[in-house]
Image: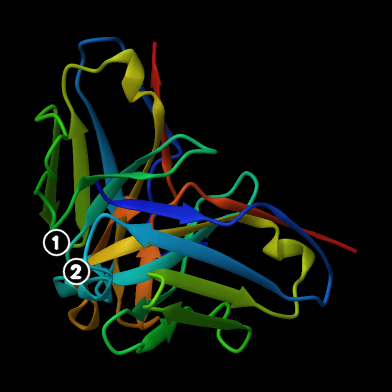
Amino acid sequence: QSVLTQPPSVSGAPGQRVTISCTGSSSNIGAGYDVHWYHHLPGTAPKLLIYGNNNRPSGVPDRFSGSKSGTSASLAITGLQAEDEADYYCQSYDSSLSGYVFGTGTKVTVL
Amino acid sequence: QVQLVQSGAEVKKSGASVKVSCKASGYRFTTYGIGWVRQAPGQGLEWMGWISLYNRNTKYGQHVQGRVTMTTDTSTSTAYMELRSLRSDDTAVYYCARSSGNFWTGYNWFDSWGQGTLVTVSS
C-alpha cells in the first residue's frame, strides 16, 4: 500500500470543479518534497499534468492546478470535461523509503 | 518531439528473467534520467527505480532491490530494465519514463512516457 493516500474516486458534472487530495506524512510531503500529478488512462502512457506542486507543462490546460500545504497536496480540475475521465496519481519522494512513490490513485468520473 | 518506444509484450515462466528496452529519441539522451514504473492488473502505479544517463548511477525501489538491474546504451539511446526471479505478482505493464529535475534531492518527475510493455508471468 502506498504512503500517499488518495480518494478512490471523485465525480462531477460537466463544467463543475473537482478536487483530488493526496495525503502523506512527515517523511514525504510534510518534509517539503514536491508533489507531481499525472493523468492516466489504463493501457496508455501516463501524462504529466503538474510538476513542482503547481507548475503546468506546456500544453496542459489551465483548468488543471495544483497546491500543497502541510502533509497534503491537491489537484483541482475546473470546467470538468468528458475527456477528463481517467485515473489521476500524485507522486513525491519519501525519505523513509529512500525512493519515489505514487499515490493510490483516484478515478475521476464525469457524470 | 520526445519519444520513448518500448519493446513488445513478453510471457515468462516463474523464476525466469525479462529484459525490457526503451529507445529514446527527440532529445539529448544523456541530459536526463530514465525511470521505470509498473502497473499490475487493477493496481496503481509503482515506482521501480531510476538510472542516470549521464553516469549510469542507479537507485532501485526496495520492493525490487536485488532482482532488478537498469542499464543504458548511450550509442543507441536505449535504456534497459531487467527483472529476475519472476513471480506471478510481477505480472504488470512496465513503463519507462524520462526523468526531469534533480533526482538526488527528491525533486524529480516524469515528463514523457513510453507506451508500456506487458509482462505476463505464468507458473
Kindly identify which chain the residue marked by label 2 belongs to: A
In what element is the residue under mark 2?
Answer: helix
Residue B39, can we see it? yes
Q: Are marks 1 and 2 in contact (CB under 8 Å)?
A: yes
Instruction: Describe the element under mark 1 as helix, strand or loop.
Output: loop
Residue at the image position 26 percent from the left and 84 percent from the top: B54
Which residue is located at x 65 percent, y 47 percent?
B41
Residue A89: x, y in percent? 36, 47
Residue, x 24% and y 77% (percent of image)?
B103
Q: In what quadrant of the picture does the C terminus of chain B appear?
A: bottom right
Query: Residue B116: horizontal and vertical position, in percent?
Result: 53, 50
Q: Which residue is mark 1?
A: A70
**Residue type highlighted by circle 1:** Gly
Q: Nearer the viewer, residue B21 or B44?
A: B21
**Which sits in the foreground, B33 or B62?**
B33
Compared with A23, A108 (above or below) is: above
Q: Nearer the viewer, residue A8 or B7?
A: B7
Mark 2 burial class by Cα count in 10 Å: few <14, some 14-19, many 20+: some
User: Given the current orientation, which residue lies at the most extreme right position?
Assistant: B123
The amino acid type, in three-letter code, at marker 2 is Gly
Q: Quadrant of residue A94?
A: bottom left
Q: Please give the chain letter of the residue carrying mark 1.
A: A
Q: Position of residue B105 (x, y in %)?
A: 18, 81
Q: Is residue A105 left or right of residue B83?
A: left
Query: Which residue is disc 2 drawn over?
Result: A30
Whole-number angstrom distance, CA of label 1 to CA of label 2 = 5 Å
* Quarter where residue A29 is shown: bottom left
> Few, some or many C-alpha atoms within 10 Å of disc 1 (few <14, some 14-19, many ≥20)?
few
* Numbered marks: total: 2
Is A82 on the left-hand or right-hand side of B13? left
What x and y, as percent, mark residue A92? Answer: 28, 64
